[in-house]
Image: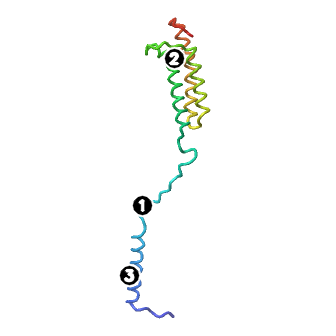
Amino acid sequence: MATPRPARTLEAASRAAAETRTAKRARTDVRATVSTVPQSGPQQYSVTDVIAGLMAAGSILLSFIATGFGVILTIEPRPALLAPVAAIVAFVAARMSVRYQRLALAAVFTSMVAFVVGMSLAVITKHPII
């Protein structure tokens, strides 16, 4: 049979355990742990990515001018020249960067629509095609 411990020993032991828990809590940080991702590889923008994005955006701008917005802006739109150039610029931008391939795809589709709409408007309004 176990011998009963005196009350003072139990009190002192529980007080020491409480002090230990308090000390551990004081040392631990209550904030959540945060991990960082190294800035290397495909998560970092490069100069090529930026240039490809600007080329795709420029291709969309050329497509809008070829569509007929050039008449509104008092720029002479030539859809037979501008729309294929816009498509070529978009293809080059898509090949340059993986990050902006979706934007370049949208630029290619925009240039195709711009060619059809721009040629139709040029014929209807009797503006020069080439």
Front label number (3 vs 2): 2
- Comparing 19 with 3, the one in front is 19
Pick whichever of labels 1 and 3 is earlier in the sequence: 3
Q: Amino acid at mark 3?
A: Arg
Query: What is the secondary structure assignment of the residue under circle 1?
Result: loop
Figure check: 113 above or below 21: above
CA gap between label 3 and label 2 equals: 83 Å
- The extreme top residue here reads 126
Give coordinates of residue 30: x percent, y percent.
41, 63
Label 1: how many residues lie within 10 Å, few (<14), some (14-19) or many (20+)?
A: few
Pick whichever of labels 1 and 2 is earlier in the sequence: 1
Count of numbered circles on the image: 3
Figure check: 31 above or below 126: below
Task: Provide the residue designation for mark 1.
Answer: 31
The answer to which quarter of the image holds residue 5 is bottom left
Q: Residue at x 37, y 89 (%)?
A: 8
Q: Amino acid at mark 1?
A: Arg
Task: Provide the residue designation for mark 3.
Answer: 15
Query: What is the secondary structure assignment of the residue under circle 3?
Result: helix
| Marks 3 & 2, CB-CB < 8 Å contact | no
Q: Amino acid at mark 2?
A: Thr
| Marks 1 & 2, CB-CB < 8 Å contact | no
Task: Provide the residue designation for mark 2.
Answer: 67
Figure check: 104 above or below 67: below
Q: Report the quarter where the C terminus lies.
A: top right
Figure check: 91 above or below 4: above
Q: Residue at x 40, y 82 (%)?
A: 16
Front label number (1 vs 3): 1
Give coordinates of residue 47: x percent, y percent.
53, 37
Give coordinates of residue 33: x percent, y percent.
47, 60
Q: Residue at x 60, y 29 (%)?
A: 92
